Image (cartoon, grey):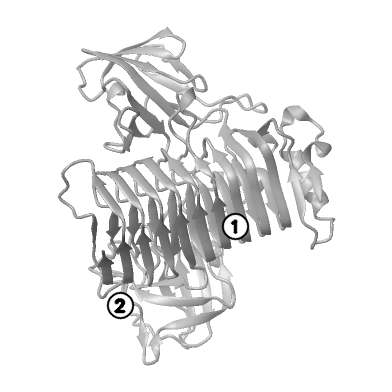
Amino acid sequence: MKINILDFLKERDRGYSEAFFQAVEYAKTIPAGVKKTLYFPKGIYDFYADYSPVREVYVSNTCGPQHQEYKNKHIAILLEGAENITVDGNGSEFIMHGDITTFAALNCHDIVFKNFVLDHASPSVVDIVVEKAEDHTVEISIPDCYIYEISPDKKDLIWKGEASPVTGKPYWEGKNNLVYNQKYMAKTGRTWRGDTRKCEVFEDVETIEEIKKGLLRITLKEKVDTAIEGICYQMRNIMRTTPGALIAESKNITMKNVRVKYFHGFGLVGQMSKNLFFRDCTFVPPYETGRTTAGFADYLHLSSIGGKVEVTGCRFENSHDDPINLHGTFLQVMEVLDKENTEFLLRYMHHETGGFAQYYIGNTVEFSMQDTLVTLKEDDGIAQRVVVAVENNYKNDKRLIKIKLSAPLLLDQTNKSKIEGNNGLNYVVENVTYTASLLVRDCVFEKIPTRGILVTTRKDVLIENNLFKNLDMAGISISCDGSNWYESGRTKNVIIRNNRFLELTTMAVFICPTAEGLPGDRIHKRILVENNEFHAAKEMKEPFVHGWGVEELIVR
């Protein structure tokens, strides 16, 4: 059954979020077994944060629950409690305005998002290019979409997002190189981080003057040799206020033939969901506009996903972090709450994560030593238990979760965490039920300042027939981290085959389990790297495949 979004449009100048929401509500009145297509006739559609549905949602690896000012997410295209729906853009372009999540599936199943382009009217990553560098003077070009002004003393460049149609105030503000920047050189196709808190064209400024709109001359007190012609500075603030897109507590979700020109706030986050599929999607900036960044951080950040994840036929360029990151989440054991050793108080440890469910009744959990990542053992094997009760936001703390297990598990309560300032026990917990297999096939990763794929999962991993070119870190990284990001996942069967790694400046495959102490046993098992091509951009000291903590690493 096809449903035209425009049939629900009332006020065009308020954007299309309300029309979409009403179309979804209508679709819910149709019998559940009927497949529905909500479609946009091909065109350009604007979505404003001010006029979009708002939900209190806490999202993995973003601003964290301590930032209550960002708890309410504005969602342009919202599916909530929906099933058997396809959202078809028919090649339309969706333009976002403000601090907004492009689309979200919350508590949904069997959903397809397809055939549209995502962009932002005023991206919160500012891309500037050095057009001319001579002695103490640098000329920079600024794409048309950015709003700027020169300070009265002519020493600072002030950036402003577009003005909200409701408040009249800019959606975001900053000055000079904002907070964080990385660099891109179109001539070489390389993107890299370097000193991310320093931008040489804004250091020791004498004067800033406008030659014409979009072209400025910056006079510096001293000559800077690294500000060379053609270099692009990609500059942004650091607060991940909202995900670019969100899939939460959902299953069987597909994103197909979607072009992302820009993801605001973060990338697409999947959390506590099952079976996610990404087909023929493109994450590439609109270079023709002068913009060179398509994402605020990761493109696909998949945290505690069950079932399977498949990424096929996709292209990733110029992100500010990993294009694909699939991982579980370690929570730390803070306290044993009962004498029977069945109730445990757990805590989200990384400051960017918390506030959402990590366990459901019936899930299986596994305990490991925090300082070595060694799993707890019992006479009959690895110590796993089934969760029989959960209390989230324990005592109104969004980082705390209380769980009750199906059988006692005896921990040494005198064994405290070895991390300075950490008052928990030396144990971490992973939800084994929410771990996914991963397939990445026929994809391109290019002009990336970080890893191409960061994967930590115990299910089968197959990475094949991909191109990795001009990455500044390892093309594929396999971690498992119990002391920093707390991204869990011991691998058991990884196959990396028939890939090409070009213009390498460091390792192609890096295996790096991270603990406060040295990993106490072989954390990862059976990693096969076969029939791949490796081409270095320069003489390298590192081997193409490197790592530790692996049992049965085969390279051939």
Give the residue at mark 2. 415
Q: Amino acid at mark 2?
A: Asn
Label 2: element kind: loop
Q: Position of residue 225 (x, y in %)?
A: 20, 22
Q: Position of residue 12 (x, y in %)?
A: 76, 29
Give the residue at mark 1. 248
Q: Residue 321 — which label? A: none
Name the residue rendered at 50%, 53% in the picture. 312
Q: Left or right of 481: which side holds 290?
A: right
| Rendered position, 377 above or below 291 | below
Q: Nearer the viewer, residue 530 or 327?
A: 530
Q: Is residue 57 visible?
A: no
Earlier in the chain: of badge 1 and badge 2, it is 1
Label 1: element kind: strand
Classify mark 1: residues with Cα within 10 Å, few (<14), some (14-19) or many (20+). many
Q: Position of residue 49 (x, y in %)?
A: 64, 36
Q: Left or right of 371: which side holds 163?
A: right
Q: Nearer the viewer, residue 151 or 1?
A: 1
| Rendered position, 317 above or below 274 | above
Q: Amino acid at mark 1?
A: Ala
Q: Nearer the viewer, residue 413 or 48?
A: 48
